[in-house]
Amino acid sequence: MKVLIVEDDREIVDIITLAFEIRWPEAQLVSTHLGEQGVEMVESESPDVVILDLGLPDISGFDVLKEIRAFSTVPVLILTVRGEENDVVKGLEWGADDYMTKPFRQLELLSRIKALTRRAGATIGDDTLVCGNLRFNSTTMQLLQDDKEIKLTRTEGSILKKLMANAGQVVVYSSIAEAVWGEDYPDAVDSLRVYIRRLREKIEENPDKPQIILTKMGLGYSMVKPD
């Protein structure tokens, strides 16, 4: 297990390193404070996951993400002080698998990293779910809507799998969070709201008036089950 940290704040790198040393000592950590070098290290170090800051001294973290996605599907978790929804959406749209804001909880970070690597390394057999005109294979992360292929991040795929497997039922926030990150945690509802918005933009005819993924206020979400 190798983790690449692309972060220019030495204190943050030390905090992450300490958390791994205590809770996940077998993990190997490598780091750089430069975005361009981070891209090169994805290729040379072959990490299992990347923790990426957005505010780097040479190039934007968004540009780093874009360059990584040009040649690699390695799971990427953005860790940044920028918590505005448009930054979160942009990160997910450009290929990030998860997004956390600083300050962060160390155990929550490790939980999310473990969830990302667990999903990336899954070797389950063919697991195709069908709901209406949606056909989703959670092994390949391939989503087809009619004959159109829709690209999903691993996190979006995990949420969709949970909803499709329980189509017609309300799936509570905590249950979705546990399916995605391995456990529920504070602010999970806010994170899920962003991911649901992204899913709706990809599969709904009108994301502002969803007909496929419905919100059950105060409870969770449900996938409409066709008659």
Image (cartoon, helix red, strand yellow):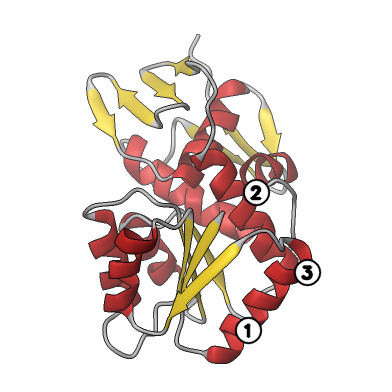
Q: Can residue 167 be seen in the rendering of this structure?
A: no
Residue type at mark 3? Ile
Q: Is residue 9 above or below residue 214?
A: below
View extreme (top): residue: 227
Quote the CA–CA distance across marks 3 and 1: 12 Å
Q: Residue at x 47, y 76 (%)?
A: 31
Q: Is residue 166 above or below residue 34?
A: above
Label disc, if present, on residue 181 of the rendered structure: 2
Quote the CA–CA distance across marks 3 and 2: 20 Å
Check disc 3: other Cα within 10 Å, few if <14, some if 14-19, many if 20+. Answer: few
Q: Locate residue 220, reporting x and y percent.
A: 67, 42
Circle 3 residue: 22
Q: Can residue 135 be seen in the rendering of this structure?
A: yes
Check disc 1: other Cα within 10 Å, few if <14, some if 14-19, many if 20+. Answer: few
| Helix, strand or loop at mark 1 | helix
* Residue 132 shown left or right of residue 116 in the figure: left
Q: Is residue 147 above or below residue 185?
A: above
Circle 1 residue: 14
Which label lies toward us, 2 or 1? 1
**Observer-nearest residue: 176 or 22?**
22
Identify the image quadrant of residue 109: bottom right
Q: Locate residue 191, reporting x and y percent.
A: 58, 58
